[in-house]
Image: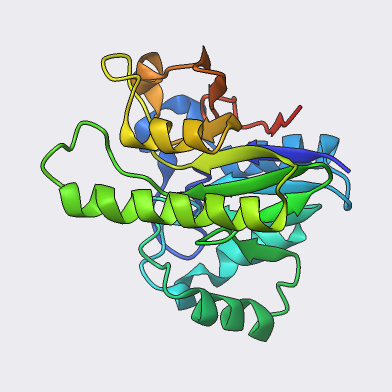
Amino acid sequence: MSVYVIGDLHLSFGTNKPMNIFGENWENHAEKIKNNWNKKVKETDTIILLGDFSWAMSIKDTIEDFKYLSKLKGKKILLKGNHDYWWTTVTNMKKFLKNNDFDNIDFLFNNSFIIEDKAYVGTRGWSITDTDNEKMHNREKIRLEISLKSAKEKYPNKDIIACMHYPPLTEQKTETEYTRIMEEYRVKKCYYGHLHGISHKEAVEGKINNIEYKLVSSDYLKFDLLKVE
């Protein structure tokens, strides 16, 4: 069994939101993702999606996007992104999945997953540059720690992989509350998304204080998936 990560699918099968307005590389991006996905993923694999899955505004309008995702190979675990306005409560979302027979999809939200020999945690996070929104940062820090505590309690001896939508650090600020929390819990790797186009140059990658950071937004990965090693 393998684990893959990718962020920012930005699907819009149920709404009119073509992504090619953000660049020619986004032309037919859903087809590119599907082709790359099915070349490497097996049904026994797990794929973690790091937010901004669908442009839909309500969960009922995500059904075509979830149909697309459900038909792809493997088990999928979704994290919330800043554009996932359709996201409601986990109870309601799981009911939606059950009612539509999307039985190979789950959510990473105030919880953790053990996959093979690693524990996976995560939260959306918030923009590091938005220093005025202390309330949102505090909420996301709490959610990150809840997820980490869940992993430590259930899987005390497993390496921890953190997944976030927003970058938890910037070139100007490589030490943040998010990085300090992850360091406290001895996270091994952190994957994040959100950055597109010219914003790719803002990505911070590599090992900092024993945590390996990597940007995995879909256009950055050329609409492919990255295998967790």
Rendered residue at 88%/52% (across/down): 43
Residue 158 lies, with reference to residue 105, above or below; the image says: above
Give whichever of 186, 13 is nearer the camera: 186
Hey, which residue is sitting farthest left in the picture?
132
Quarter in which the N terminus is drawn: top right
Q: Is residue 21 visible?
A: yes
Q: Dividing the picture into quarters, in which one does residue 211 lie?
A: top right
Q: Is residue 112 visible?
A: no
Rendered residue at 33%/21% (across/down): 170
Looking at the image, residue 115 sits to the left or right of residue 226; the answer is right
Question: Residue 201 at what x, y percent from top left?
Answer: 38, 14
Quarter in which the C terminus is drawn: top right
Rendered residue at 60%/77% (across/down): 94
Rendered residue at 61%/65% (across/down): 66
Looking at the image, residue 197 sits to the left or right of residue 71; the answer is left
Q: Dividing the picture into quarters, in which one does residue 19 lie?
A: top left
Give whichever of 202, 206 is nearer the camera: 206
Give whichever of 143, 217 is nearer the camera: 143
Question: Residue 7 at what x, y percent from top left?
Answer: 53, 40
Give whichever of 220, 78 is nearer the camera: 78
Q: How is the image coloured?
A: rainbow
Question: Residue 12 at what x, y percent from top left?
Answer: 47, 56
Residue 51 lies, with reference to residue 57, above or below; the image says: above
